Image (tube, rainbow, N blue to C red):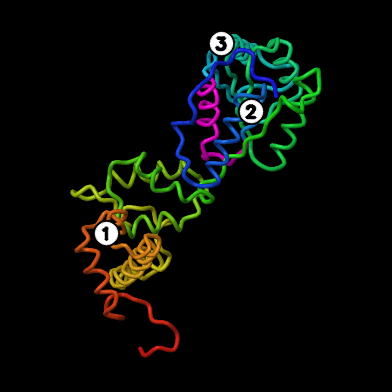
């Protein structure tokens, strides 16, 4: 694949992105390869997953000589009757991003692609931020057919950004980047169990609001989270029984999470305590309580005495 004609060597990694999970690591690897090889890049993913941030990192990593312009497709008409204001905004974006990167958020129409081709003269990197699946496939075909006058197999790349629910290994580092507040183990377990339809953007909003309602010690507890993220057995309990049900449910969630972390650390209590943000004596005390049976909140296996 040919290198972009106005590109210099950039950083080896996309430093602004959290990518410890396997899926996000693969995504960054695809983006890095595309940044050094393709003229047009399609960044496909769900809203809020970090698509525009990835597009910006593609530009900054390659260290183009030109600027970065981001335009929203909702404000650009895709027919020949585009209004004068949108037309001028598009021309300014094209000019500013010459020898740089133009990021277009939305599915481009044929007339827009023809205009980009006429105004570009091969000096700008194009990044199209679109929905995944069929939309991304149609965009790839349209860009290849309309933006290039020669075979575009080596000029168009597709980078898929995973949704947050598919990259939960990044959750802890994302949380640390969004808030300085401490997140209790029970709260973090609830965050892990949520589907995150709004992806990383929703996570940031949730943590911002939770940090404002956190108590004096600066710890985000499960009561600081929206009801949609709290365990269902807590939010659906009648008010007069909610306190007892909440205590029992949190004890069970906390025990499950601590046991999972302990297993991940191969039984090393010192390492597990560090990951949990607990003093090792506190962890040992909790483990002793769990071994005490039902009184500690441990769920009994079927067939055991009640």
First along the sequence among labels 3 and 1: 3
Callout 2 secondary element: strand
Give x and y (percent) for residue 165. 52, 51
Residue 128 - label: 2
Label 2, label 1: how far apart the Cα atoms are: 47 Å
Tell me if mark 3 has few (under 14), some (14-19) or many (20+) residues whose alpha carbon lies within 10 angstroms of its own: some
Tell me the quadrant of the picture where the N terminus can be found. top right
Give x and y (percent) for residue 16. 44, 31
Residue underneath mark 1: 270
Q: Is residue 134 magenta?
A: no
Residue 96 - label: 3
Q: Nearer the viewer, mark 2 or mark 1?
A: 1
Above or below for 95 versus 26: above
Tell me if mark 1 has few (under 14), some (14-19) or many (20+) residues whose alpha carbon lies within 10 angstroms of its own: some
Residue at screen point 48% across, 31% down: 14
Q: Is residue 55 magenta?
A: yes
User: Label 2 near label 3: C-beta < 8 Å?
Assistant: no
Above or below for 73 versus 26: above
Give x and y (percent) for residue 143. 74, 26
99 and 7: which one is in front? 7
Residue 119 picture quarter: top right
First along the sequence among labels 2 and 1: 2
Callout 3 secondary element: helix
First along the sequence among labels 3 and 2: 3
Residue 158 picture quarter: top right
12 and 94: which one is in front? 12
- Segment colored magenta: 44-62
């Amino acid at each position: 694949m040919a290198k972009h004609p106005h590109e210099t060597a950039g950083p080896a990694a996309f430093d602004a992105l959290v990518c410890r999970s396997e899926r996000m690591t693969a995504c960054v690897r695809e983006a890095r390869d595309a940044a050094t090889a393709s003229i047009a890049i399609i960044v496909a993913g769900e809203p809020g997953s970090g698509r525009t941030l990835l597009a910006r990192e593609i530009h900054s990593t390659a260290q183009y000589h030109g600027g970065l312009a981001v335009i929203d497709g909702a404000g650009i008409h895709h027919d020949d009757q585009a209004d004068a204001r949108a037309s001028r905004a598009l021309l300014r974006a094209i000019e500013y991003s010459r020898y740089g990167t133009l990021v277009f958020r939305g599915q481009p129409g044929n007339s827009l692609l023809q205009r980009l081709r006429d105004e570009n003269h091969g000096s700008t990197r194009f990044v199209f931020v679109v929905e995944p699946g069929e939309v991304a496939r149609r965009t790839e075909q349209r860009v290849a057919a309309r933006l290039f006058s020669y075979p575009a197999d080596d000029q168009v790349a597709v980078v898929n950004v995973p949704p947050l629910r598919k990259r939960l290994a990044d959750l802890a580092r994302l949380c640390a980047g969004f808030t300085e507040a401490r997140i209790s183990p029970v709260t973090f377990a609830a965050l892990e169990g949520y589907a995150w339809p709004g992806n990383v953007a929703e996570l940031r909003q949730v943590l911002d609001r939770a940090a404002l309602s956190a108590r004096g010690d600066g710890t985000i507890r499960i009561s600081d989270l929206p009801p949609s993220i709290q365990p269902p057995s807590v939010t659906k309990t009648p008010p007069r029984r909610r306190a007892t049900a909440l205590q029992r449910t949190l004890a069970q969630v906390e025990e499950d999470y601590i046991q999972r972390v302990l297993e991940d650390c191969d039984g090393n209590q010192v390492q597990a305590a560090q990951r949990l943000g607990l003093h090792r004596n506190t962890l040992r005390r909790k483990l002793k309580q769990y071994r005490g049976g039902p009184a500690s909140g441990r769920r009994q296996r079927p067939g055991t005495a009640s």
